[in-house]
Image (cartoon, helix red, strand yellow):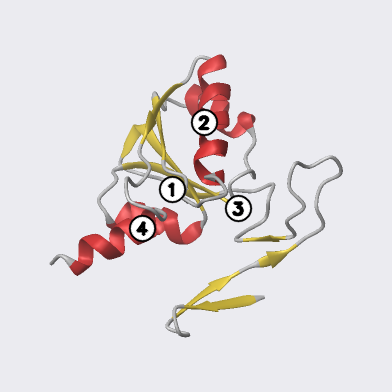
Amino acid sequence: MIQFVDNCELAEFRILYKPKPGASTKKTLSVGLPGAPFFWRGADPTTCLVVEGCLEMLAGVTMGYRGHVVGTAGTGCWDLKWFEALGADGVQTFDLAFNNDARPDGNPGQEVQATLAKELVKVGLRVRDASPIEPGDINDALLRKLAKR
């Protein structure tokens, strides 16, 4: 499926799938396969940015992030084994940059980021918050940065 946004100026490819039994969300639409992340091999093998989706992964690279980048298929579509393997391969710090949804009904991106951070710390991995301060995702932060030029 292709989702057009912003007055049809942008398009995102989406994948439809069946929700996993017992999943906390019943979403059936993602920006990739829930069991397989997008991955960018960076120049600095000691850091890894973790974002939601391929566009956000590329936005991180465009903004100058030098480490590896993992783009999940959505907020809750991650597997702790991915990060443990990256840690065993030399990643020392995971920079988490999930959406800052800032909605009246909550902030699901930041809630899931906090859960992921706790899980990473439990297995001895270091995390930093790299989320946008303003509402939106890292792609929105890139667009704001480009607009200031």
Q: Nearer the viewer, residue 105 or 86?
A: 105
Q: Amino acid at mark 3?
A: Ala
The residues bearing labels 3 and 2 have C-alpha atoms spaced at a distance of 17 Å
Quarter in which the C terminus is drawn: bottom left
Mark 4, other Cα within 10 Å: few <14 / some 14–19 / many ≥20: some
x, y percent for residue 134:
33, 51
Q: Is residue 18 left or right of residue 69?
A: right
Q: Earlier in the sequence, mark 4 or mark 1?
A: 4
Q: Amino acid at mark 2?
A: Ala
Labelled disc at residue 114: 2
Mark 3 lies on a secondary structure that is: loop
Q: Nearer the viewer, residue 34 or 86?
A: 34
x, y percent for residue 101:
48, 51
Q: Earlier in the sequence, mark 3 or mark 4?
A: 4
Q: Which residue is mark 1?
A: 100
Mark 4 lies on a secondary structure that is: helix
Residue depth check, mark 3 versus mark 1: number of the one nearer the observer: 1
Mark 1 lies on a secondary structure that is: loop
Q: Which residue is mark 4?
A: 59
x, y percent for residue 54:
49, 58
The residue positioned farthest toward the bottom in the image shown? 8
Q: Nearer the viewer, residue 149 or 84?
A: 149
Residue 53 vertical position relative to residue 122 in the rendered view, above or below: below
Residue 91 vertical position relative to residue 5 in the rendered view, above or below: above
Residue depth check, mark 3 versus mark 2: number of the one nearer the observer: 2
x, y percent for residue 111:
55, 37
Q: Is residue 141 left or right of residue 33?
A: left
Labelled disc at residue 73: 3
The residues bearing labels 4 and 2 have C-alpha atoms spaced at a distance of 22 Å
Mark 2 lies on a secondary structure that is: helix
Mark 3, other Cα within 10 Å: few <14 / some 14–19 / many ≥20: many
